[in-house]
Amino acid sequence: MLSFVNRIKAFRRMPPLLAEIGNGAPASVEALIEAVFAATGELRFVQIGANDGRANDDLTAVLERGRIPEEKVSGLCLEPQREAFEALLRTHAGRSGVQCLNLALGPVEEERTLWNLAEERRGDRRRGDFGSRLGSFDRDLVLAQWRKLATPALRDLPPEAILVSEQVACVTFEGLARRTGLTSFDLLLIDAEGFDAEILRLIDLERWRPMAIVLEHKHLSAADKRWCFSLLKSAGYRIGGSSKDLWGRRPVA
């Protein structure tokens, strides 16, 4: 259950959530994941932007509780950053049903430039550590987030002292399905550092009809937030959310 303070933060960042109190949606992402398993008897998922499978990862938190049998778990985890991907492989080692791919999702199959913080800048956060979580195709977003959260004495560093880039491979969702043999899934998880709405636009929800969807809204524009909310609402999802994420679940027939 969201605390009162977190509810206020959620409504400030995603005002349409105010109308969704008491609609029957799960109260957290972890509760949503467990609800999918309870409804289907298995957990079939696609996770876009899995990072290392640890940082703020509700899926791994649920799996590590051990209440969902390993043989009932199957899914795809996409992570374009090479360093984070190597850690992701270690996180899901031993989970035979989980396939990790060093890819990004995109509208066409191509290579794109992904930006992140230089390793020496990851400890500059006022509280905690940035890690590799800021990886994004939007260079300005990475810079803005670093300057917002870094210690004040460092905020005037030039971009070349803050950022590194790498070329990453992009695949379309239909191409991903062909490559992996994906035919259906129940849970879609998106954490794409400001590109979550773009990712959602690349997936034909009428064709795939996942039972539940989670995306990160905190880096989205107001227009993209409204679009994501309206899309889920019009597709029949019961909406829930926090100051960070927006989620929806289709009612069980």
Image: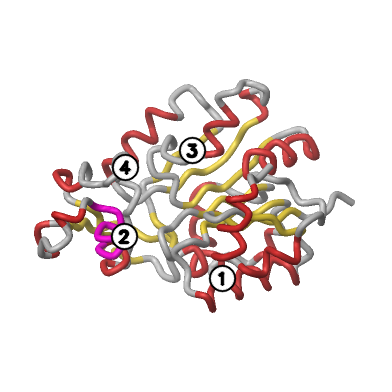
Tell me the distance, in whole angstroms, between the alpha carbons under discs 2 and 3.
Answer: 30 Å
Magenta extent: 143-150
Q: Residue at (22%, 45%) from the top-left corner?
A: 122
Which comes before the other along the chain, label 2 or label 3?
A: 3
Q: Which residue is mark 2?
A: 145
Q: Secondary structure at mark 3?
A: strand
Q: Is residue 93 above or below residue 138?
A: above
Q: Is residue 165 left or right of residue 98?
A: left
Tell me the distance, in whole angstroms, between the alpha carbons under discs 3 and 1.
Answer: 30 Å
Which comes before the other along the chain, label 3 or label 1?
A: 3
Dot in front, 2 or 1: 2
Dot in front, 4 or 3: 4
Nearer-the-camera pick, 240 or 139: 240
Which residue ends up furthest to the right in the rendered image? 253
Q: Which mark is residue 2?
A: none
Mark 2 surroundings: few (<14), some (14-19) or many (≥20) residues within 10 A = few
Q: Which residue is mark 4?
A: 127
Instruction: Kindly indicate whether the residue at mark 3 contacts the one at mark 4 (C-beta within 8 angstroms).
Output: no
Nearer-the-camera pick, 253 or 122: 122
Mark 3 surroundings: few (<14), some (14-19) or many (≥20) residues within 10 A = some
Q: Residue 55 lies in magenta, yes or no?
A: no
Q: Secondary structure at mark 1?
A: helix
Q: Which residue is mark 1?
A: 225
Q: Which mark is residue 99?
A: 3
Dot in front, 2 or 3: 2
